[in-house]
Image (cartoon, rainbow, N blue to C red):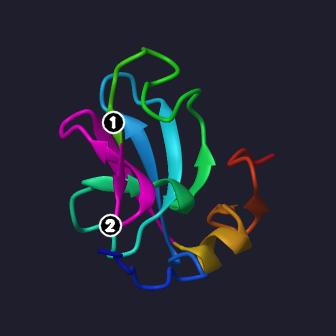
Amino acid sequence: AVRCFAKPRSKLPDRRVDIRCANCSALLYRYAKANGAGSRLVKVYAERIVKDMTDDSRNCPSCGQLFARETTIHGKRAFKIIQGKVTMDDLGSSDYLRVGLLHFDIAGHTSSTGHFT
């Protein structure tokens, strides 16, 4: 029997999260998460990884800890996250990221580095 899957969305979700190693806090991925940052991270679709800091997408580049197992879900390459091995930081929507990370001091001066003179 032939299995037909729904056509994948051409646009990535707007919400971005940083996925970090729970052991050493190294940045592993910047990921476009579909259902908000409030829910647990169970799987990561390879096509939604915006920035990959790992060498093989499964091991932390800093401490070498295995944090995911490669699999195929709904015909797409994905990684099943091993619970307790990663943490997730919400970055908000991509509109926020396009503006950039600017830091403001009390007088209203801006700095992209966070250091003020």
Residue 59, compared with residue 89, is above or below; it is above
What is the x, y in percent for residue 70? 38, 40
**Residue 104 figure quarter:** bottom right
Residue 35, compared with residue 112, is above or below; it is below
- Residue occupied by mark 1: 68
**Viewer-side residue, 41 vs 104:** 41
The answer to the question of whether label 2 and label 1 lie on touching residues, with beta carbons closer than 8 A, is no
- Residue occupied by mark 2: 37
What is the x, y in percent for residue 87? 31, 43
Dominant secondary-structure state across the stretch colored magenta: strand
Name the residue at the top extreme: 63
**In the figure, is residue 47 to the left or right of 22?**
right
CA gap, disc 2 and disc 1? 19 Å
**Residue extent of the magenta highlight:** 71-92
Disc 1 crowd, CA 10 A, few/some/many (<14, 14-19, 20+): many
The tag earlier along the polypeptide, 2 or 1, is 2
* Magenta-colored stretch includes residue 50: no
